[in-house]
Amino acid sequence: MPIQILQDQQREIRLIEFSGTVRREELGALSRLYIDRDFYRFGDREVVFFKPDASLAAIDVEDISHLADSYIEAIRMRDDQTAVLSAWVMGDHVRADIRLWWEFTRGHVQMREPRTVVDNIEAALIALGLSPDWAEDLQAHRGFRRFDSAGPAQT
């Protein structure tokens, strides 16, 4: 599964993992996630983790635009202006693609969320003001529920 979306509601943290070749079809799960009030809470902290095998080369600007539009629509529908505090864990293999995402979505006022780029999960947790002791739980998905096309499911 190229994109996994997991939520630990007790600790108020979300994990979005990218692995393998991500295609436009997989971005649909993120679009559906934004409108799910029970699962996606704008105020929760977020770790976006690009595994070493992740590739975004199959994603084009139109796909990014659709994803940004979905996010903006969710904010409008939910009347929620809370910015998501987000730490992105990535290697050099995806940095150029991510810069394109960010550059393309910069024009959307609501997409200006605080994002920190780090090299590992522990650094992401520290950047978010959370305990680095949670890193093992995060990587093993302990305490997290998975979001899929049918909605949240226990992992």
Image (cartoon, rainbow, N blue to C red):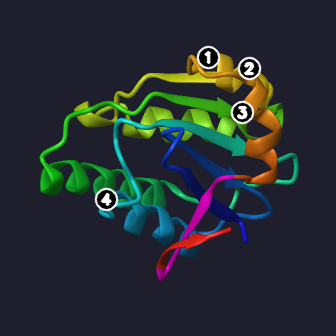
User: Which residue is label 4 attached to?
Assistant: 70
Give the spatial CA distance, label 1 vs label 4.
Answer: 27 Å
* Mark sitting earlier along the chain (1/3): 3
Labels 2 & 1 near each other (Cβ < 8 A): yes
* Mark sitting earlier along the chain (2/4): 4
User: Which residue is label 2 attached to?
Assistant: 123
Q: What segment carries the magenta color?
A: 143-150
**Label ID, residue 127:** 1
Labels 1 & 4 near each other (Cβ < 8 A): no
**Label ID, residue 153:** none
Q: Does 56 appear in magenta? A: no
* Mark sitting earlier along the chain (3/2): 3
Give the spatial CA distance, label 2 vs label 1.
Answer: 6 Å
> Label 2: few (<14), some or many (≥20) within 10 Å?
many
Q: Position of residue 97 (x, y in %)?
A: 65, 42
User: Which residue is label 3 attached to?
Assistant: 89
Quadrant of the drawing holding the C terminus: bottom right
Out of 81 and 112, give the one closest to the viewer.
81
- Which residue type carries mark 2? Ala
Q: Nearer the viewer, mark 3 or mark 2?
A: 2
Is 155 on the left-hand or right-hand side of 77?
right
Kind of element beneath mark 3? strand
Residue at 68% from the left image edge and 35% from the top image edge: 96
> Label 3: few (<14), some or many (≥20) within 10 Å?
many
* Mark sitting earlier along the chain (3/4): 4
Q: Position of residue 92 (x, y in %)?
A: 81, 32
